[in-house]
Amino acid sequence: MFQLISDKLVELVQKHSKTIVKRWSARLLSDPTTSGYSQKNIKFAESEAVDLLENMGRWISYDTAKEEIGRRYANEGIELFKMGIPLCEVIRAMYVLRRTLWLFVENESAFDSAFQLHQMRELNDRVILFFDRAEYYVIRGYMEEMHRKLKDLSSINKEDVEKIFFERSFYNK
């Protein structure tokens, strides 16, 4: 396994995952741009976020396959669709989580050397790459479920559904 120089910062995140998630969920519940998140469904989001942060080292590792991230986050997208949270709010919540995580790391870390700044830069690069991949797969899973639901519930013919969703881009046909 390839070691990251930012491992100490990853350990900080993993150790304080519940604190970070508590800040994040409070922001989601008070932000009008994430009004789809409510007391009714926030527990699912919190559980997923805690799992992510408690296992941050594995998720941002160079050894974690993109397919593993894809399966995990496509399934999360499916669940979020079923919960009725608008896709724009799902992605906004992911941005807010990434920002909350970054602010926590900045506030809890002391910068007194070029090496520590390099650790921060490395962590930032790996977290951004991870979130980019996770967001892609959340959107993909969400849209796949939306596509499935439309085909199941609608009187629209399959050819017209394909004009909207471009089925060839989905995994779960």
Image (spheres, rainbow, N blue to C red):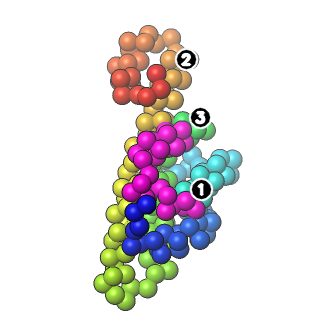
User: Which residue: 69% across, 47% down?
Assistant: 40
Ranked by sequence position, the earlier of labels 2 and 1 is 1
Task: State the separation of the CA atoms marked 2 and 1.
Answer: 32 Å
- Quickly name the residue at label 2: 152
Task: State the separation of the CA atoms marked 3 and 1.
Answer: 20 Å
31 w.r.t. 72: above or below: below
Ranked by sequence position, the earlier of labels 2 and 3 is 3
Residue type marked 2: Asp
User: Which residue: 36% across, 55% down?
Assistant: 129
> For this view, does 116 lie left or right of residue 144?
left
9 or 44: nearer the eye?
9
Q: Secondary structure at mark 3?
A: helix
Q: Position of residue 50 (x, y in %)?
A: 60, 59
Q: Secondary structure at mark 1?
A: helix
Query: Would you identify the image quadrant in which residue 130 lies?
Result: bottom left
Q: Are marks 2 and 1 in contact (CB under 8 Å)?
A: no
Q: Residue furthest front?
A: 1
> For this view, does 15 lie left or right of residue 128?
right
Look at the image and give the residue range highlighted in magenta.
Answer: 53-76
Residue type marked 1: Asp
Q: Residues within 10 Å of mark 3 (few under 14, many from 20)?
A: few
Which label was assigned to residue 51?
A: 1
Is residue 100 on the magenta stretch?
Answer: no
User: Which residue: 40% across, 63% down?
Assistant: 2
Placement of the N terminus among the 4 image quadrants: bottom left
Q: Residues within 10 Å of mark 1 (few under 14, many from 20)?
A: some
Q: Position of residue 90 (x, y in %)?
A: 49, 47
Which label was assigned to residue 82?
A: 3
